[in-house]
C-alpha cells in the first residue's frame, strides 16, 4: 500500500511535524474555484487533443460539478495530509469518478497548476479592486463637488502656505487613485498569461494545445518559457507593489482625516457610524477607521518586502519557497479591498441603488476658512501684486517679508493692515491691494491649468466624472 499521496517510493509515512509544516491547504483552499476551472479547461483540451477519452472528460466534468457543490455547501472535507488545494480536489475527484480522475494530471504538474491558479484567482480579485478604485475616486469627487469655493489653508512643511479649495485638495487624491488604477490595469496584462503546459519545468511530451487552454480561461496569451512559467512570481510582487502604493495613498488621506478631525483643526466631522468612543473618556469620538487604514498600510508594505525577499536567491525553477507567496498575497488583497471599500464609504457616503449618496465627510467650511486666515496665506499674492506693479520678484518677496513681520508684531493678517502701513513698505501699493489679499481673490487668481481656481477645479471634476462614467 502506498504510504503517500504521490509515490510508492517512500518507505515510511511523513512525520507529523513535516505534514503540518508543509501543508498549505488551510490557506490555499481559497483558490478552489480557480483550481477547478483550470482543471476543467485542461481536461477539455486533453480530450480535444485525443490524449484522454470523451468519457474521461465527461466523468471529470461530473466529478468536478459535485466537488464544487460540496465545497459551496461546506460538505467538502479538506485534509491536511493531502497537503494543498490541488491534491485535495484531485483525490476527491478520483474517489468520485475513478480512473478518469487519475488521468486529469496528464501533461500537468502542480508547478504549472499552482502558478495558473494564483494567476486566475488574482485576476478576478484585480477586476474587483479596479471597481473599488473607481468607487473611491467617485467618493472623492462627491466630497469635492460642493466645495470648489470652500477655502482651506494649503500646507507645505505642515505650515500654512497658500489658500486652496477643499475640492482641489480632494482632486489631488483622485489623481493618485487614477494613477493606481492605470498601474493595476498594467499589472493585469502580465498576470493574465497562462503557465499551464510548462508542466514541472521543461514542458511536456504530450501534444497539448496551450493556446486553446489560454483562450478557454480568458488569458491574453501563454507564458513562452516553461522554466520561467513555473518559477517566477513577479506578477504577484508587481500586484503587491501596486497595492503598496494604493495603501500609501490611502494612508496619507487617512492621516489628513485624523488631523482634520482633531479639535485643533476642526476641519471636518465624520458620521457617528464611522467613529468609536472611549471606555473611559465620555467625550471621545475617535476616527478609528482612518487610523486603522493608516496602520494597515504597514502590513502591505511588509508583504511587499516579504515577497521580494521570497523570490531573491531562488534558483530556477520551482522551489517550495513559492508556497509562501499565498498568505501575503491573500492578505494584501483582503486589506486593499476592505480598506478601499470602507474609506470610500466614509468619505463619499453610502450609495443608494439610484446613485444618491447619504452620509460621508462633513466639511466645516467656516473652520477651514478661519484657519486659512491665520498664517499669512496670501503673502505670495501680495508679492505677485508688487511684481505686476513692476518690482522684480525677489524684491517683492523681501517687501512682503517686512509686511508679514509687521503683521506678526501687531497680531493681524496682511489684509488687516491699514493701507498707509502697507504703503510704508512700498509706495506702489494702492487701494486695489485688498482684493488680492482676500482668500477668494487668491483662489481665483490661480487660474492656471491644474491650479486651485474654482473654474479649474470644476473642469477637473467634470473631466474625472466623464472618465469614470
Ligand atoms: N502548494 C504548492 C505551492 O503552493 C503547490 C506546488 C507544489 N509543487 C511541488 N512540486 N511540491 O507552491
Image (spheres, rainbow, N blue to C red):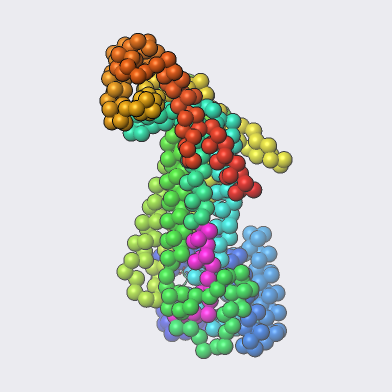
Residue 11 appears at what percent x and percent y?
A: 42, 82
Q: Is residue 231 above or below residue 405?
A: below
Point out the residue furthest to the front here.
390
Report which quarter residue 271 is drawn in: top right
Q: Nearer the viewer, residue 376 or 369?
A: 376
Q: Does the stretch in magenta take in 185? A: yes
Q: Residue most toward the right?
A: 354
Residue that appears at 67% across and 81% down: 57
Residue 110 image point, x, y percent? 50, 75
Task: Tell me: 308 left or right of 285.
Answer: left
- Residue 172: x percent and y percent? 48, 40
- Camera-side residue of 411 and 400: 400
Say which residue appears at 58% left-offset and 60% top-offset.
Answer: 124
Q: Is residue 189 magenta?
A: yes
| Left or right: where 48 falls relative to 328 | right
Residues rendered magenta in the picture:
184-201
Residue 347 appears in view: no
The image shows residue 369, relative to residue 217, as above or below, that is above
Numbered label tally: 0
Whether residue 271 sits left or right of residue 13 in the image: it is right
Residues 224 and 63: in front is 224
For residue 323, above or below residue 403:
below
Examine the rendered structure and indicate whether residue 406 appears above or below residue 459.
above
The residue located at (56%, 44%) in the rendering is 137
Q: Position of residue 100 (x, y in %)?
A: 64, 82
Residue 221 at least partly seen:
yes
Query: Which quadrant holds residue 376?
Result: top left
Amino acid at each position: 500500500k502506498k504510504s503517500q499521496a504521490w509515490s510508492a517510493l517512500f518507505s515510511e509515512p511523513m512525520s507529523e511535524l513535516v505534514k503540518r509544516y508543509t501543508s498549505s491547504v488551510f490557506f490555499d483552499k481559497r483558490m478552489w474555484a480557480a483550481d477547478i476551472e483550470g482543471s476543467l479547461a485542461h481536461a477539455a483540451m486533453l480530450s480535444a487533443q485525443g490524449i484522454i477519452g470523451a468519457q474521461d472528460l465527461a466523468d471529470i466534468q461530473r466529478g468536478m460539478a459535485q466537488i464544487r457543490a460540496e465545497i459551496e455547501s461546506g460538505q467538502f472535507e479538506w485534509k491536511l495530509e493531502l497537503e494543498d488545494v490541488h491534491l485535495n480536489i484531485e483525490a476527491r475527484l478520483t474517489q468520485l469518478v475513478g480512473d478518469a480522475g487519475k488521468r486529469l494530471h496528464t501533461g500537468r504538474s502542480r508547478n504549472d497548476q499552482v502558478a495558473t491558479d494564483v494567476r486566475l484567482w488574482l485576476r478576478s480579485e484585480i477586476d474587483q479592486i479596479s471597481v473599488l478604485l473607481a468607487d473611491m475616486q467617485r467618493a472623492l469627487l462627491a466630497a469635492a463637488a460642493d466645495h470648489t469655493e470652500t477655502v482651506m489653508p494649503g500646507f507645505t512643511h505642515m505650515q500654512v502656505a497658500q489658500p486652496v479649495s477643499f475640492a482641489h485638495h480632494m482632486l489631488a487624491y483622485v489623481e493618485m487613485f487614477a494613477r493606481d488604477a492605470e498601474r493595476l490595469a498594467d499589472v493585469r496584462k502580465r498576470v493574465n498569461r497562462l503557465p499551464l503546459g510548462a508542466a514541472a519545468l521543461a514542458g511536456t511530451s504530450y501534444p497539448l494545445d496551450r493556446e486553446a487552454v489560454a483562450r478557454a480561461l480568458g488569458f491574453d496569451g501563454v507564458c513562452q518559457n516553461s522554466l520561467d512559467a513555473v518559477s517566477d512570481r513577479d506578477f504577484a510582487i508587481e500586484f503587491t507593489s501596486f497595492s503598496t502604493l494604493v495603501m500609501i495613498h490611502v494612508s496619507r488621506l487617512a492621516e489628513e482625516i485624523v488631523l482634520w478631525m482633531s479639535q485643533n483643526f476642526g476641519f471636518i466631522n465624520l458620521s457617528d457610524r464611522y467613529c468609536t468612543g472611549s471606555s473611559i473618556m465620555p467625550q471621545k469620538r475617535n476616527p478609528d477607521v482612518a487610523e486603522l487604514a493608516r496602520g494597515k498600510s504597514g502590513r502591505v508594505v511588509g508583504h511587499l518586502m516579504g515577497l521580494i525577499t521570497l523570490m531573491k536567491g531562488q534558483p530556477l525553477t520551482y522551489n517550495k519557497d513559492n508556497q509562501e507567496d499565498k498568505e501575503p498575497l491573500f492578505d494584501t488583497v483582503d486589506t486593499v479591498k476592505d480598506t478601499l471599500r470602507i474609506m470610500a464609504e466614509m468619505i463619499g457616503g453610502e450609495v443608494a441603488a439610484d446613485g444618491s449618496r447619504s452620509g460621508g465627510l462633513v466639511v466645516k467650511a467656516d473652520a477651514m476658512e478661519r484657519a486659512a486666515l491665520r498664517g499669512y496665506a496670501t503673502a505670495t499674492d501680495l508679492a505677485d501684486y508688487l511684481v505686476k506693479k513692476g518690482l522684480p520678484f525677489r524684491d517683492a518677496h523681501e517687501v512682503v517679508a517686512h509686511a508679514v513681520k509687521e503683521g506678526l508684531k501687531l497680531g493681524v493678517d496682511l489684509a488687516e493692515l491699514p493701507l498707509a502701513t502697507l504703503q510704508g513698505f512700498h509706495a506702489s501699493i494702492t487701494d486695489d491691494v485688498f482684493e488680492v489679499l482676500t482668500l477668494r481673490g487668491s483662489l481665483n487668481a490661480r487660474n492656471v491649468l491644474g491650479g486651485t481656481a474654482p473654474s479649474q477645479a470644476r473642469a477637473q471634476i467634470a473631466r474625472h466624472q466623464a472618465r469614470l462614467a
